[in-house]
Image: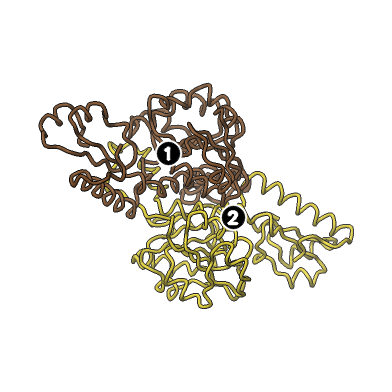
């Protein structure tokens, strides 16, 4: 917000730059904005760490059934803790990262500390040193990653190419014991296909920081499933990141206004 | 035995004169009266190393969930009353923060390894100092005095075993030494923390939050103040609750029992 449309841009003839807070620009009509001679900048640095952290938080919370566990721990009906209540391991499991940009790479750095086996799929392959630093194996075909991963994490940006990247076919390729984690954009997943896959236990679980729309309608099936965690798009919702995003956005905007090199123009 | 049941007391031991060995699940043995068992000629075993990685993983899960307000966030995301996601709703960052590990045994060290992946600054307090290579491998700085660790940490994680020395290790004094922005994480035993002091500290915002996999007792009475506080997450002692680990624990226990019955040296004897 505000929504950048034709009307708004016409009413602001002296507008030079739109400084977007956050890294995603899928909500901006870049062509239209460019026609008005307005530049667009984003804040890739500020978002990288906290978003990678949320990806790890969701993966761990889902694997160890943390939200359910909390509910059991505080429920008025709980008399004892059942012994046969189990989650799945994260350490030494296989993590498949789809989208190995700066956020995806940071996820790999964190996952390595858990001794995870890391596979990744990306438009371009990373350099050997970068792969070796985190022990990541490139999967040229996304199918290979999907079939081998215990956790699949989506860290791509939303473009026409990544829209509904994960649909019925892709979910069918995943292990029935696998978990899908989404910290990218809701529209990267075919949500109806996901509902079906979760209902029929085609995959074990999902953990989503992003959906389409946000929030979901209150009667949406995703909100009723027991094998899903949803968080309200909090990937960058930290005190530190909010400050850094503001600083980064301001630095970008000042650079445009002063005719200097722009740190992160889109 | 699982989850401290059956209770091993004089009565039980007298009713089982041929009992050779008690195989206890998990690493903690604070619930076993070793003198009593020994006086009846009964051996005991635990499952120490197999629980370490899962427990360390859960410690990290609790730290992340607490700092990013994951449980609250989930409730908001699914609540019937939610119309939009508020923009001014914030958590705090784990990456780059300072983690103080109290108890740098196998589990504590694994926590340090994981925290390093998040570029955390790691302080630790332990009965004994780890060697230089171990410290540099995870970038951990030794705090001889627990007070130093408490004063500097954004997250304090307890991974000691429960002994008379660690009983109520964290009380009113220790909580007050912590930063008002700090979070206490407990993956050790409920009794390592003075629970009443913790309730007071959380109510008065002496510390910011707590995340507990263990309490005393388990479960807590349903009207306990800890269950009502907004700035607490409690999980039902699930540190080792994964399929693979539970299977390994059973295998370990079975091996110990078989050795105990045949008079061979017992693996993981305590």
Question: Residue A230: percent from the left, percent from the top?
Answer: 42, 38
Q: Residue furthest bottom?
A: B145
Asked which quadrant contains residue A37, the reply is: top left
Question: Residue B188: percent from the left, percent from the top?
Answer: 57, 62
**SS type, badge 2:** helix
Question: Residue A212: percent from the left, percent from the top?
Answer: 36, 30
Q: Chain of mark 1?
A: A
Count residues near mark 2 (Cα–Cα under 10 Å), then give few for <14, some for 14-19, many for 20+: many
Give the residue at mark 1: A183
Give the letter of the brown chain.
A
Give the distance between the C-alpha atoms of the residues marked 1 and 2, in whole angstroms. 25 Å
Left or right of residue A219: residue A68 = right
The vertical placement of B50 against B12, above or below, is above
Question: Residue A177: percent from the left, percent from the top?
Answer: 60, 34
Cβ atoms at labels 1 and 2 below 8 Å apart: no
Count residues near mark 1 (Cα–Cα under 10 Å), then give few for <14, some for 14-19, many for 20+: many
Left or right of residue B29: residue A137 = left
Query: Does mark 2 fall on the same chain as mark 1?
Result: no
Q: Chain of mark 2?
A: B
**SS type, badge 1:** loop
The vertical placement of B130 against B138, above or below, is below
Which of A52/A136 is in front? Answer: A136
Give the residue drawn at x 20%, y 39%.
A17
Give the residue drawn at x 45%, y 73%.
B174
Left or right of residue B38: residue A248 = left
Left or right of residue B89: residue A191 = right
Of circles 1 and 2, the one toward us is 1
Give the letter of the yellow chain.
B
Give the residue at mark 2: B55
């Amino acid at each position: 917000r505000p929504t950048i449309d034709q009307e708004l841009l016409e009413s602001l003839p002296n507008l030079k730059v739109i400084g977007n807070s956050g890294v995603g620009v899928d909500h901006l009509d870049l062509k239209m904005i460019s026609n008005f001679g307005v530049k667009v900048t984003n804040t890739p640095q500020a978002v990288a760490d906290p978003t990678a952290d949320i990806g790890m938080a969701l993966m761990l919370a889902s694997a160890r059934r943390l939200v359910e566990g909390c509910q059991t721990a505080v429920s008025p009906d709980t008399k004892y803790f059942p012994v046969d209540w189990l989650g799945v391991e994260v350490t030494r499991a296989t993590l498949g990262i789809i989208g190995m940009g700066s956020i995806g790479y940071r996820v790999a750095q964190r996952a390595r500390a858990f001794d995870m086996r890391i596979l990744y799929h990306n438009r371009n392959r990373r350099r050997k040193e970068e792969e070796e630093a985190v022990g990541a194996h490139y999967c040229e075909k996304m199918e290979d990653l999907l079939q081998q991963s215990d956790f699949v994490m989506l860290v791509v940006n939303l473009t026409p190419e990544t829209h509904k990247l994960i649909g019925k076919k892709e979910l069918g390729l995943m292990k029935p014991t696998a978990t899908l984690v989404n910290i990218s954009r809701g529209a990267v997943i075919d949500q109806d296909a996901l509902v079906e896959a979760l209902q029929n236990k085609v995959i074990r679980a999902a953990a989503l920081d992003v959906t389409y729309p946000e929030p979901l309608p209150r009667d949406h099936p995703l909100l009723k499933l027991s094998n899903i965690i949803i968080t309200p798009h909090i990937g960058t919702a930290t005190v530190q990141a909010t400050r850094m995003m503001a600083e980064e956005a301001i630095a970008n905007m000042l650079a445009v206004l002063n005719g200097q090199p722009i740190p992160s123009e889109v | 035995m699982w989850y401290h049941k059956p209770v091993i007391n004089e009565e039980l031991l007298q009713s089982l004169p041929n009992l050779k060995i008690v195989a206890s699940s998990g690493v903690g043995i604070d619930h076993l009266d070793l003198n009593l068992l020994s006086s009846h000629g009964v051996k005991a075993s635990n499952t120490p190393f197999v629980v370490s990685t899962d427990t360390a993983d859960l410690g990290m899960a609790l730290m992340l969930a607490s700092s990013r307000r994951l449980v609250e966030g989930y409730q908001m995301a699914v609540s019937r009353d939610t119309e939009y996601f508020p923009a001014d709703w914030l958590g705090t960052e784990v990456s780059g923060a300072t983690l103080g590990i109290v108890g740098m045994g196998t589990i504590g060290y694994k926590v340090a390894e994981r925290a390093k992946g998040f570029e955390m600054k790691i302080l630790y307090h332990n009965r004994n100092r780890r060697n230089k290579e171990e410290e540099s491998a995870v970038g951990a700085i030794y705090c001889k005095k627990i007070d130093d660790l408490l004063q500097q940490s954004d997250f304090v994680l307890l991974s000691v075993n429960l002994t008379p020395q660690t009983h109520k290790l964290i009380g009113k004094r220790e909580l007050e030494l912590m930063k008002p922005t700090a979070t206490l994480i407990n993956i050790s035993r409920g009794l390592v923390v003075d629970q009443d002091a913790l309730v007071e500290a959380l109510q008065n915002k002496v510390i910011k939050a707590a995340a507990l996999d263990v309490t005393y007792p388990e479960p807590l009475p349903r009207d306990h103040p800890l269950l009502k506080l907004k700035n607490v997450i409690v999980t039902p002692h699930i540190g080792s609750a994964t399929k693979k680990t539970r299977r390994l624990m059973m295998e370990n226990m079975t091996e110990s029992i078989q050795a105990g019955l045949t008079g061979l040296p017992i693996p993981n004897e305590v």
